[in-house]
Image: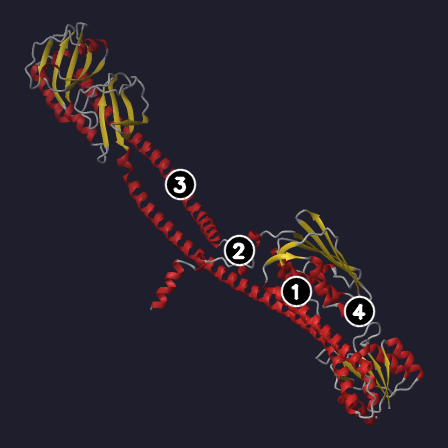
Amino acid sequence: MLKIFQDFLKSLWPEFYRHRTNVHLNSFYTFTNYRYLWFISISVLAATALAPICIATLIYYQLIETSVDSDLNHRTKQLTVAAKSAVTFFMEERLNALTFTVNENGYEQLTDNTRLAEILKNLKLGFGGVTDLSVLDADGNQVAYAGPFNLEGKNYKNQSWFEQSLKQINYISEVFTGYRDVPHIIITVRSVKPDGSSFILRATLDTERLMQTLSSYKTGDYADIFLVNHEGKLQTPSIHYGAIFTPTNLIFPAGSDESEVIEIFLNGKSIISGHSSISRDLTSTPFTLMVLKEKAGMLKFWQDMSFKFNWIMGASVVVILIVITFASTFMVNKLYRADKAKAETMMQMEQSQQLASIGQLAAGVAHEINNPLAVINQTAGYMKDLFSFKDQERDDDEIVEYIDSILDAVDRCGTITRQLLGFVRQFDVKIKKVNLQKLISQVLSFHKKEAEYRRIHVTVSIPDSFPELETDSSKFQQVLVNLINNAFQAVEEGNCLDIIASQLSPNTIELVIHDTGCGIPEENLKKIHEPFFSTKKNGSGTGLGLSITYGLVKKLGGRISVQSTEGVGTSFTIHLPVKINEGRNA
Amino acid sequence: MKILLVDDEQKFINMLAKRLALRGIEADTAYTGEEALKKAESAVYDVAVLDIKMPGISGPQLKRKLFTLHPNLNFIFVTGHGAVEKSEEDGSEKDIYLSKPLDIDFLIETVQELIQAR
């Protein structure tokens, strides 16, 4: 249980986040900044995963907005046209009925009050909305009247509607209160008496019926349908503008038969407004039909949908981010562990290669020591013989000579062991001053006999002005051991090995190790610095020598290059700083 | 019984030759392969004791050259390397390797075994 909890904590606070830089291991890591890698991984994955979602969402909203807009406009226009037809029909129906009444009955019958009352009754039955009827002569005198108000004998000569009625065959007035204090509309039909003078049949329409017609087109809570006159005064009550006769800024040029839909802002609300003037073929009316629809209300359905959509999108984004974060953490952690294992293996490899090169030296050293030991053995043995074989003459000078040769041989052994110790001791020394001449002759001393036996001409050329290097001596020494060992393995009897050092600039030296050995085939030249590449048969080489040399030179702040021609020879060229940059090395 | 000692380590074979002489074995010394070949031309040896690593002609090379001169000659190799390596060019007979430092009694024993085996 505790372990699961610890694992969970580890996955939250992954290993690479707790990475401690280790001076020895650092150079073996492939990636140095795992936190940065982790950050990049999450950002790139998140960007690629979320970008399509964001774009899709934007497009979705764009599409919704335009489609909702055009849908709203379309619907408002339809409603405007429908309501306009209804109002027009309402007016026309009554006007036609009135025209019919005038033509059918004539002046005589119309001025008969009983007949007029009968006609009013029939009109009310047939069409509804007609309050009263009256007949006026050309001077504005009310000749006959039928209806609920006692208006007989009134003169309308000075009323504006009367002047208009005389000018036109048909006339439809605005909504007004007139003598009776009730909003109404007057419609008139002009006709001719038998004596040739004009008379007018007037009907009063109550606005109640008109308002009913309009409200039958109100669909939903957000629609507002009403009429305004050409001065913008309300002719029916409006939800947005208030009671009847309230002046508004809704002034439209008369006579346009077309319906128009625009978007306006009213009291901070976005409103789709359709308007169309109510007109007839013969007479124009003073009305303009207004249809107002609140956009917000119409959008409610879409907003509800968007809300759900946003929730789904938000949830997906959160899920994607969580998955990406966990996946990235997991992957980077795996990578980190693999890299760490690699770095540790590489370090062990380097150490074991270092030991292997010491081992190689040891074999040479044993040989070097065994020769003087053999001399000591035989000389001491002979001296013993001199005493054992009694008949032998013993000359003191001779014995001293033998003792001297034993001491000589002991000296030789001592020199070799001192060299080896001095050499091995360097493996644990960090940065210090290095005399290249001394170091090279130390390394070469282990090959002295081999060079003699195989008649290999070794030349070392180091100018007198060559500076003392300040570098990691153990690493540099290993580079030299590896390269010189390699050269000795590559050369045949009688070949040459040249070691040439020169100073390129105040802070750079060049060291060329050139041999006239077998050379490296071109196809292998690229691979020689790769780990485990070896041309030695039967696993006699690890294939690590040059790859480690390559890594060591890099750690010393230098670079190594190789030129080789098969059968002619090989040159390894090393460029090194005179003073190693300690910060870089660490 | 006559032995040819070949090694570039002069003091070593000089002493060895003196000690062998004390034990009644005649031994000639040669410091290089060339010198050994010259001596082999004028004398007949039973056994040649060769150092493997020598400047110029190496031990195994010298063995081949001496073998063509004296097919009946026996060879003993002496090496400073502790480990005894098998020579790749040994014929039907197995070569005998002794490591330095050399014990003189063991050398004489080996030489006598070789001669008796013949």
Q: Residues within 10 Å of mark 4 (few under 14, many from 20)?
A: some
Which is more N-terminal, label 4 or label 1?
4
Q: N-terminal of the two: label 2 or label 1?
A: 2
Which sits earlier in the primary sequence, circle 2 or circle 3?
A: 2
Please identify the residue farthest to the left as the structure is shown: A150
Which residue is label 1 attached to? A545
Position of A128 compared to A232: left or right? left
Q: Nearer the viewer, mark 2 or mark 3?
A: 2
| Label placed on residue A58 | 3
Of the numbered discs 4 and 3, the one sitting upstream in the chain is 3
Above or below for A409 versus A283 = below
Q: Earlier along the polypeptide chain: callout 2 or callout 4?
A: 2
Q: Chain of mark 4?
A: A
- Closer to us: A40 or A340: A340
At label 2, the amino acid type is: Phe
Task: Tell me the number on the disc at residue A237.
Answer: none
- Residue with the mark numbered 4: A452
Query: Crowding near pointer 2: few (<14 within 10 Å), some, many (20+)?
Result: some
Q: Are marks 4 and 3 on the same chain?
A: yes
| Residue holding disc 2 | A31
Q: Tell me if A248 is positioned left or right of A525 in this view.
A: left
Tag 1 secondary structure: helix
Residue under the image location 28 percent in, 24 percent down: A275
Task: Give the amino acid at mark 4.
Answer: Glu
Residue A234: name its quadrant: top left
Q: Are marks 1 and 3 on the same chain?
A: yes
Quadrant of the rendered structure where residue B71 is?
bottom right
Give a yes or no on whether discs 2 and 3 share a subunit: yes
